Image (cartoon, rainbow, N blue to C red):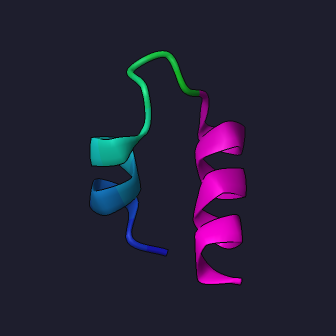
């Protein structure tokens, strides 16, 4: 997962678990 990329797109209030969820969905 590319954390900097997802952090850039994700809202500032997103938790790590939500970020991982979005990242996995994007790669699927």
x, y (%) of residue 10? 43, 38
Residue 10 placement, left or right of 5: right
Residue 4 placement, left or right of 27: left
Image quarter of residue 5:
bottom left
Quadrant for the C terminus, please.
Answer: bottom right
Residue 11 placement, left or right of 22: left
Which residue shows up at 42% across the image and 26% down it? 11
Tell me: residue 23, above or below residue 8: below
Tell me: residue 22, above or below residue 27: above
Tell me: residue 5, above or below residue 10: below
The rendered magenta stretch, by its main secondary structure, is classed as helix
x, y (%) of residue 17? 71, 42
Tell me: residue 17, above or below residue 24: above
Foreground of the two, 4 or 10? 10
Q: Please, which residue is most extreme toward the top here?
A: 13
x, y (%) of residue 2? 38, 71
Residue 26 inside the magenta-drawn segment: yes
x, y (%) of residue 16? 60, 39
Which residue shows up at 63% across the image and 54% down it? 22
Q: How many marks?
A: 0
Foreground of the two, 25 or 20? 25
Q: Please, which residue is most extreme toward the bottom here?
A: 28
Which residue shows up at 35% across the image and 44% down it? 9
Residue 2 inside the magenta-drawn segment: no
Point out the stretch of residues depicted in magenta. 15-28
């Amino acid at each position: 997962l590319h954390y900097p990329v997802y952090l850039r797109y994700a809202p500032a209030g997103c938790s790590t678990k939500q970020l991982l969820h979005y990242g996995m969905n994007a790669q699927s």
